Image (cartoon, rainbow, N blue to C red):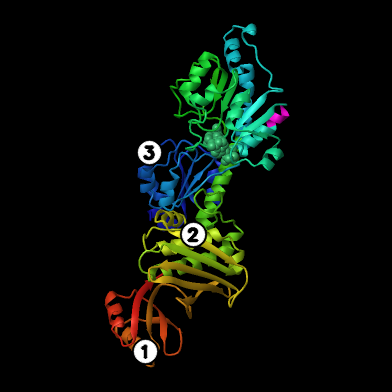
Amino acid sequence: MTDIQKTTQKPRVLISDKMDPNAARIFEERGCDVDVITGESPEELVARIGDYHGLAIRSSTTVTPEILDAATNLKVIGRAGIGVDNVDIPYASGKGVVVMNTPFGNSITTAEHAIALIMALARQIPQANTRTQAGEWPKSAFMGVEVTGKTLGLIGAGNIGSIVASRALGLKMKVIAFDPFLTKDRAVEVGIEKVTLDDLLARADFITLHTPLTDETRNILSREALAKTKPGVRIVNCARGGLIDEAALKDALESGHVAGAALDVFAQEPAKDNPLFGAPNFICTPHLGASTNEAQVNVALQVAEQMADYLVNGGVTNALNMPSLSAEEAPKLKPYMALAESLGSLVGQLAHGNLPKISIEMEGGAAELNAKPITAAVLAGVMRRYSETVNMVNAPYLAKERGIEVREIRNSREGTYHTLLRVTVETEQGNRSVAGTLFGSGAPRLVEIFGVGIEAELDGHMLYIVNDDAPGFIGRIGTLMGENGINIGTFNLGRREAGGEAVLLLSVDDAITPEVVDKACGLEGVRMVKALSF
Ligand SMILES: NC(=O)c1ccc[n+]([C@@H]2O[C@H](COP(=O)([O-])OP(=O)(O)OC[C@H]3O[C@@H](n4cnc5c(N)ncnc54)[C@H](O)[C@@H]3O)[C@@H](O)[C@H]2O)c1
Ligand SMILES: O=C(O)CC[C@@H](O)C(=O)O
């Protein structure tokens, strides 16, 4: 912990990119300390980041593994915007850091920028402006095209693509879209025709890109794809550099096959020396898609609210590596997550060997809840046997990495308890399961351990003993604890049947040493002993 945390106990947030001042105001109002330090080098950020719990960024900060390794207190990265390709999300997930974005705050603004670039291309406005202001009055040099009746091809019809479609329909364009994830119903709702990529390339007079940059979309407008476009096509990219082969686009502009191209984004940014600069009918803007006052206020407010909500209350919104948890759900789910984590931890501490399968059953009241955070909490508990730094963010990744199969089972019928969570792991010795419920005001209680009914609070240091159910045992264990100066807090008993296998769970004030565990193992009637901690 840093000195500031020691004195204020407030979460500390660093805003490392230029952001509307509303973000800093919201962080402060929601109980965070905030520093705005922009324009630092990666080395400077590495040196600074260890002090912070939250990092708020736009597109200028690239969050690399080196930065994440140095970010020993970091809990959340918030992107004031949509694209998160400047954050190493798998690495952040591995470190247990939540990554959030603001998926809608700048969509309208960016869609409007795409429309502006379509119009600028159609009428060569930037070129005409430059020459007119140079005193040329070049009236006959610029013959434009109308957009009315022309076909606009959208590659990607998500938030922004759909808004572009609605504006283009208003301009009386015909809109076709290639998006493998676009449903027929959604296409009808937006008023567009769903087509294949080849169909789009062959038919579109204007093409505009609105996909994220992924392994599938990288170079989606490759040299080969550009060759399939309609001669005289005009191309706009306000999504991500890397979607178009820039060298191939330059050749297509020079040959005249592509009549114009407008890029807001480049493969390398900032683009200070790009091969496309100076190509015929090429216009560009420096990643201005999201740059309006309205959008910047939206994304700044949203990112600060989401991050502060997570840092202060544990609410999760728009996270890319963790299930969402609304402000209404959070208080309801909190006791379940505590129960889920302690059940996971119990089974993780007691089960031997690999755990290839984990199933999480939610019964009664629990079956009505958002299962994802509960599952993540169980996994965090189980995976603690492998790593001390595990949490709800990285546990599902860690489980996947280890090839653990996770099943969620819901049963809305109530059994003995109004609500119940059961965690079962497959071990070499067979399935092992523990179950718990919530008492009264939401207090988590273990109610079953490996088939034996018991009632215990899983908290702090505990001793788990399996023994023969016979008179005198409780006295022997009490004496052993007393002789070793161990104060017993609670004493919880359960048995399979009278005179058979019995289970004892003691809560004690201090950690139990291996010597005491050995002594307990040596007591008459003891079958196994394990020190636990929660
Ligand atoms: N220029 C800017 O300043 C700026 C501003 C905001 C967003 N963006 C970028 O715009 C892009 C779109 O943002 P959005 O909010 O519309 O995202 P979105 O997730 O709502 O939509 C993306 C769409 O792309 C589709 N898609 C995914 N893979 C595809 C593929 N292989 N082929 C065709 N379609 C595919 C998805 O199905 C989805 O419908 C993102 O890359 C985002 O980073 C840029
Ligand atoms: O922050 C910006 O200016 C760009 C944002 C944009 O690229 C996004 O993906 O939201």
Q: Secondary structure at mark 2?
A: helix
Q: Are marks 1 and 2 in contact (CB under 8 Å)?
A: no
Identify the amino acid type marked 2: Ala
Does the magenta run of residues contain 168? yes
Identify the amino acid type marked 1: Phe
Distance, label 1 to label 3, CA atoms, is 62 Å
Q: Mark on residue 376?
A: 2
> Residue 38 lies in what quarter of the image?
top left
- Upstream in sequence: badge 3 or badge 2: 3
Image quadrant in which the N terminus is located: bottom left
Q: Secondary structure at mark 3?
A: helix
Q: Nearer the viewer, mark 3 or mark 2?
A: 2
* Residue positioned 48% across, 62% down in the render: 377
* Residue positioned 63% across, 11% down in the render: 142
| Image position of 250 with respect to 388: above or below | above
According to the picture, the residue beneath numbered tag 1 turns out to be 473
In the image, ligand 1 is in what quadrant? top right
Region in magenta? 167-171
Q: Residue 245: x, y in percent?
A: 48, 26
Identify the amino acid type marked 3: Pro
Q: Say if residue 211 shows up in the picture.
A: no
According to the picture, the residue beneath numbered tag 3 turns out to be 42
Image quadrant in which the C terminus is located: bottom left
Q: Nearer the viewer, mark 1 or mark 3?
A: 1
